Image: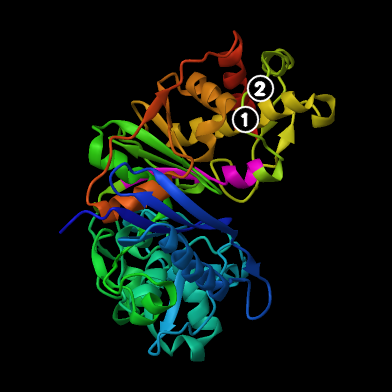
Amino acid sequence: MTAPKTIAVVDIGKTNAKVVLVDGESFQEIAARTMPNSVVTTAPYPHFDTEKLWAFIVESLGALNRERPIDAISVTTHGATAALVGEDGDLVLPVLDYEHDGPQALADAYRAARPRFAESGTPIMPMGLNAGLQIYWQSKRFPEAFAKARHILMYAQYWTFRLTGIAASEVTSLGCHADLWEPRNGRFSSLVEGQGWTSLMPPVRKASDVLGPIRPDIAAATGLRPDVPVHCGIHDSNASLLPYVLTRKAPYAVVSTGTWVVVMAIGARSVTLDEARDTLINVNALGDPVPSSRFMGGRAFSLLGGKSGDLPAAAVAEVLERGAMLLPSLPEESGPFPGHKATWTVPRTDLSEDAAQAVIAFHLALMTATCLELIGAEGPTIVEGPFAANTAFLMMLKVAIDRPVLAGGSATGTSIGAACLAAGRAPEPVLVSIAEELPMGAAGYAARWRLLAGQG
């Protein structure tokens, strides 16, 4: 099979959706189209606007194909999301927004039905962050609609199903704090069997498998060749991880940044994961368990009005000298310090804007360092995504973990990782070692932050 020259990646993040063209030889992004991923707040519950997303995907594929003919399609999406599809291929219920707390109404009953943490590697999470809880709640709250479901599809596979008409399951999404998969045993969890969902789960396929060509009507609507293959798809944080899994020796850690900061350790030292602190076991594209932790760092960055880029040395010095800190957590519900209310030790209004930006960057770096420690990460830490361009974040992370920090070269690591599925290979990632140093006092600042953060 000839390697594809041009790969279209459908990349559905929690905040933004993209369709990106990636060169199959150089793995450079050629072109991209983006739209906000909005949530519909009308009945029956907050849900993703899948029809608006679908129209965007089809229109973008057509427009990008006119720029450069597309040879293959790969899909990557955020996790904690499942779609219930009927015999006719349509949704029987809208795709639930995982930030909706409605499923928590059945949390007690669900605890009795769900697998133990030792089995699934999935902690109990707030809102609808356990996809298993979402499905359980939908089955009890909307039994008539649920009874019409033919397939339970994880979110990436929902979009590949719409592109090909072929249903599949895939382990990176099943294993993303969903309670649906046993990472260590490589099989569906006891929840799936216990709830009678086994027949609704399509066959498990590799993320790189070709499910089939695009449907004829999509080929006609977009102008793509009718034989363009569509690959099974992958969870977005695992897409960022994939080039390293395929090219790098352990130990190392990858920090995938977006709405969520997801920290994944390869070759970690053996530690007991604390399910109360948002640690979990993800599953990589090869099916291997990966100790992980996370927090909503991108959401916090947005809520705080964070800005990337270099900061004046005077602003950094001001923060270190005054001990100005932002203590966890924002948002409060998730991450390594759940239930802690975010606090500025020096009021933000008393700081210059540049100093406030340094405090925000340091906070996010120290949250990331905490996540790395919780999962036993060793070796260099690689930062992918938007935070790879935040120098203050990278410098404080290096101080806090006292190990090398490397910045990924692409601002959309998920898209490049997903393109690897179609290319059948991965490039050696282009990484930049962080050589810049913070002034004296940074290590003491980090230690003080840890002490105060732990006190809550």
Measured Cα–Cα span from mark 1 to mark 2 = 10 Å
353 lies left or right of 36 = right
Q: Is residue 299 magenta?
A: yes
Residue 318 falls in image quadrant: top right
Q: Is residue 96 magenta?
A: no
Q: Residues within 10 Å of mark 1 (few under 14, many from 20)?
A: many
The answer to whether mark 1 and mark 2 are in CB contact below 8 A is yes
Where is residue 223? Give x, y as percent: 39, 72
Residue that appears at 48% across and 36% down: 371
Q: Residues within 10 Å of mark 2 (few under 14, many from 20)?
A: some
Residue that appears at 73% across and 35% down: 343
Residue 255 falls in image quadrant: top left
Residue type at tag 1: Ala
Mark closer to the chain start, 1 or 2: 2
Does 326 sit above or below residue 78?
above
306 lies left or right of 86 = right
Residue type at tag 2: Leu
Q: Which residue is mark 2?
A: 311
Does 259 sit above or below residue 189?
above
* Quadrant including the N terminus: bottom left
Where is residue 2? Give x, y as percent: 18, 56
Residue furthest to the right: 349
Q: Which residue is mark 1?
A: 361
Residue 178 falls in image quadrant: bottom left
The residue closer to the viewer here, 333 or 304, is 304
Q: Which mark is residue 94?
A: none
Where is residue 229? Give x, y as percent: 27, 67
Under circle 2, the secondary element is loop
Question: Range of the magenta residues?
Answer: 290-301
